[in-house]
Image (cartoon, helix red, strand yellow):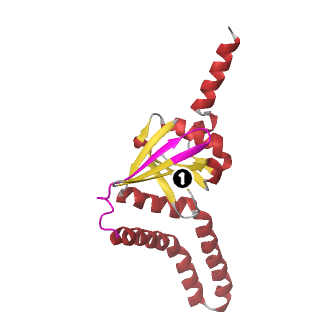
């Protein structure tokens, strides 16, 4: 079982916004830019000024999207002046069948058992894991806040989520979860008696 924790962190939230905009939604961004460039070619035949406008929109769309995401994050955090002060702890326990998410806020505590099949998708970066419970929002886990080895968590997510887990770390695909591994060792030792 792998355990991890997370506390509200504005820099991590902003980093997630950048990741979400440019890595998760890149297909949408490419489609919009492609449509604008295709329109630009058609408009070139009609009017050079509209061609320049369409090309300009295609060029500024990606950074504009990121700026809007950044503003949205800061606005959301601005509405909650206690964002970084809030004792809002997220505790994660990853087992064979599901992820247990415990949210502690002051004296309140909520516990959720989330089967891997209900997780929309998960990503591993050099420094974080992003676990999407729906298309737009994700739970952030910093690798430095994992009790143990981040490769073990990558192995669990890869094993139980398959194609819904995306990692730049190709070694993660080769690691079986620790529970599976230890079970195999016990069977081998048991047969030798």
Between 28 and 30, which is closer to the camera in this rendering?
Answer: 28
- The C terminus is located in which quarter? top right
Q: Is mark 1 on a helix, strand or loop?
A: strand
Membership of 92 in magenta stretch: yes
Residue at image location 57% in from the left, 30% down from the top: 178
Q: Which residue lies furthest to the front in this view?
A: 107
**Residue 106: % across, % down:** 33, 55
Relative to 177, 86 lies left or right: left
Q: Within 10 Å of the Cα at label 1, are there few (<14), some (14-19), or many (20+) other Cα atoms?
A: some
Image quarter of residue 136: bottom right
Residue at image location 48% in from the left, 45% down from the top: 92
Q: Which residue lies furthest to the bottom in this view?
A: 46
**Residue 129: % across, % down:** 50, 48
Residue at numbered disc 1: 131
Image quarter of residue 108: bottom left
Residue at image location 51% in from the left, 64% down from the top: 21
Between 30 and 2, which is closer to the camera in this rendering?
Answer: 2
**Residue 89: % across, % down:** 38, 51
Give the extent of the magenta segment. Answer: 80-100
Between 159 and 43, which is closer to the camera in this rendering?
Answer: 159
Residue 113 versus residue 188 in the image, above or below: below
Residue at image location 60% in from the left, 25% down from the top: 182
Membership of 188 in magenta stretch: no
**Residue 31: % across, % down:** 64, 71
Relative to 62, 118 lies left or right: right
Residue 10 versus residue 75 in the image, above or below: above
């Amino acid at each position: 079982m792998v355990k991890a924790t997370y506390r509200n962190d504005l820099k991590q939230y902003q980093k997630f916004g950048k990741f979400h905009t440019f890595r998760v939604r890149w297909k949408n961004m490419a489609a919009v830019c492609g449509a604008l460039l295709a329109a630009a070619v058609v408009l070139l035949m009609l009017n050079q000024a509209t061609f320049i406008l369409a090309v300009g929109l295609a060029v500024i769309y990606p950074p504009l999207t990121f700026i809007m995401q950044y503003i949205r994050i800061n606005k959301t955090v601005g509405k909650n002046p206690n964002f970084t002060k809030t004792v809002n702890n997220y505790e994660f326990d990853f087992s064979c069948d599901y992820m247990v998410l415990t949210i502690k806020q002051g004296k309140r505590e909520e516990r959720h058992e989330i089967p891997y099949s209900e997780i929309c998708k998960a990503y591993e970066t050099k420094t974080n894991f992003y676990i999407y419970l729906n298309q737009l929002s994700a739970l952030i886990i910093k690798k430095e806040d994992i009790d143990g080895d981040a490769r073990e968590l990558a192995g669990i997510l890869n094993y139980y989520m398959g194609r819904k887990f995306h990692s730049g770390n190709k070694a993660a695909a080769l690691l079986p979860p620790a529970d599976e591994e230890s079970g195999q060792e016990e069977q081998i030792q048991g047969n030798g008696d």
